[in-house]
């Protein structure tokens, strides 16, 4: 009899993969990924995505934060706890961004 | 300091001691004595900071009330302050209506005038448009920075939140630095200088952005003066530093405290037990006594 363990491990690995990589759906819909804002840090702090990926930030802090592109490519409004902001990265390049209220909070998204 | 002075100082620790510094030697007097000394060209003013009107978090459910309490404390002073300096973050993240509420609340305070500098919370959404629309009049080119003289003391209000750079620190910018150099050029070195601004002009904790990137250049124009007092907000706690003739004082907020540098994963509103909140919020009274080189600074908690 086949033990169920390898299947479970494979499934868990798939889940992990799905959580860390932008998943391109079979029908060609926009790939998506998420970034959390927690304890004044963007997590993950640096991220590489494929061109066309929609990135969604969610603020998990009590404090208000923003997602503001250093070069002016995008700028969120003030995000309260639980609020999100999304931006779709069409063109390849390195996009550095910060929180306009707490500018020591910095991160970069590399679009391939 | 004699034995009696020392005992008075001990008795007043935590409730309000006037510290004065002459030639680097600290001495102290109680508030009552400071009041007695005021005569002639002497005057006092008050600094309030980080009122964060619009904030609705766990750290303080009613920031309007704690600001009102601060204003009540000011109105109960034996001698009304000549003016008030508000060192920024009037609003919390430019919440709709917050600037109006601040203006309404400050109408009730007994003083001749309130001077403002912005915090990042007042300008981050619109680059300072609303703030400067309200408070830019009479400032240098309407850009928010300004100076004035009061009874022989030269006051300079600096703006260090309009051009945050990639280093995450406050910044004055070349235009303002040039203005500052011009502004103080003709003053004799004996003129007492008071600088008020939002983000600290010394590197309190750059990791959290608690510093101003180009502050050294500004301080370079001021070091020749015999007495320079720098008052700021932003970090919501009292810290002091002496560098030659320059005394730095960060102020309490009237809204909520923040952790001491490096003691938490990040800065931000800090929840303290309800019965301790008014011990970490407050205002600052500053007295100038003619003939003394340093100004007397008193930090007063709300309770």
Image (spheres, coloured by chain):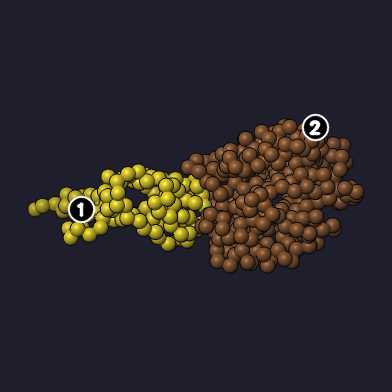
Question: What residue sits right under mark 1 in the picture?
Answer: A11
B58 above or below B161? Answer: below
At x 27% / y 50%, what residue is drawn? Answer: A51
Q: Are marks 1 and 2 in contact (CB under 8 Å)?
A: no
At x 87% / y 37%, what residue is drawn? Answer: B2
Nearer to us in this view, B157 or B27? B157
Q: Position of residue B156 (x, y in %)?
A: 71, 45
Q: Colour of chain B?
A: brown
Front tag of 1 and 2 = 2
At x 61% / y 63%, what residue is drawn? Answer: B99
Q: Secondary structure at mark 2?
A: loop
Q: Is residue A23 left or right of residue A85?
A: left
Q: Position of residue B49 (x, y in %)?
A: 66, 54
B123 above or below B248? Answer: below
C-alpha distance separating marks 1 and 2 = 73 Å
Question: What residue sits right under mark 2 in the picture?
Answer: B23
Chain of the residue where label 1 is placed in the rendered structure:
A
Chain of the residue where label 2 is placed in the rendered structure:
B
At x 67% / y 64%, what residue is drawn? Answer: B103
Is the residue marked by circle 1 packed among few (<14), some (14-19), or many (20+) residues within 10 Å? few
Residue furthest out toward the front:
B141
Q: Secondary structure at mark 1?
A: helix
Q: Position of residue B189 (x, y in %)?
A: 78, 34
Q: Colour of chain A?
A: yellow
Can residue B96 be seen? yes
């Amino acid at each position: 009899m086949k033990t169920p363990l390898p299947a479970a491990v494979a499934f868990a690995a798939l889940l992990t993969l799905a959580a860390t990589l932008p998943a391109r759906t079979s029908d060609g819909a926009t790939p998506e990924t998420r970034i959390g804002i927690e304890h004044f840090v963007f997590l993950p702090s640096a991220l590489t995505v494929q061109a066309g990926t929609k990135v969604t930030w969610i603020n998990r802090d009590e404090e208000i934060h923003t997602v503001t592109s250093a070069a002016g490519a995008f700028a969120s409004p003030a995000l309260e706890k639980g609020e999100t902001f999304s931006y779709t990265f069409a063109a390849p390049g390195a996009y550095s961004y910060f929180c306009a209220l707490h500018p020591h909070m910095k991160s970069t998204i590399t679009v391939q | 300091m004699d034995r009696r002075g020392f005992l008075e100082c001990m008795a007043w620790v935590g409730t309000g001691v006037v510290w004065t510094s002459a030639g680097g030697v600290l001495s102290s007097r109680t508030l009552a004595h400071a009041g007695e000394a005021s005569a002639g060209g002497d005057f006092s003013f008050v600094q309030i900071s980080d009122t964060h009107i619009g904030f609705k978090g766990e750290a303080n459910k009613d920031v309007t009330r704690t600001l009102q309490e601060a204003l009540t404390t000011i109105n109960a002073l034996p001698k009304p302050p000549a003016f008030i300096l508000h060192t920024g973050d009037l609003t919390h993240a430019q919440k709709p209506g917050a600037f109006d509420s601040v203006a309404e609340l400050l109408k009730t305070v007994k003083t001749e005038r309130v001077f403002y500098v912005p915090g990042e919370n007042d300008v981050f959404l619109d680059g300072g448009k609303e703030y400067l629309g309200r408070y830019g009049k009479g400032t240098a080119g309407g850009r928010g920075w300004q100076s004035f003289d009061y009874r022989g003391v030269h006051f300079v209000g600096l703006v260090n939140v309009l051009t945050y750079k990639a280093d995450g620190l406050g910044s004055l910018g070349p235009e303002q630095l040039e203005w500052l150099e011009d502004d103080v050029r003709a003053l004799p070195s004996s003129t007492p200088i008071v600088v008020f601004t939002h983000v600290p002009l010394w590197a309190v904790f750059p990791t959290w952005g608690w510093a101003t990137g180009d502050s050294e250049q500004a301080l370079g124009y001021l070091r020749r003066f015999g007495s320079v007092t720098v008052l700021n907000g932003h970090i919501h706690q009292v810290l002091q530093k002496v560098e030659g003739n320059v005394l730095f004082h960060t102020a309490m907020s009237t809204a909520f405290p923040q952790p001491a540098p490096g003691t938490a994963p990040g800065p931000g509103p800090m929840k303290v037990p309800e019965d301790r909140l008014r011990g970490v919020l407050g205002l600052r009274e500053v007295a100038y006594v003619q003939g003394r080189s340093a100004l007397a600074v008193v930090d007063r908690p709300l309770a």
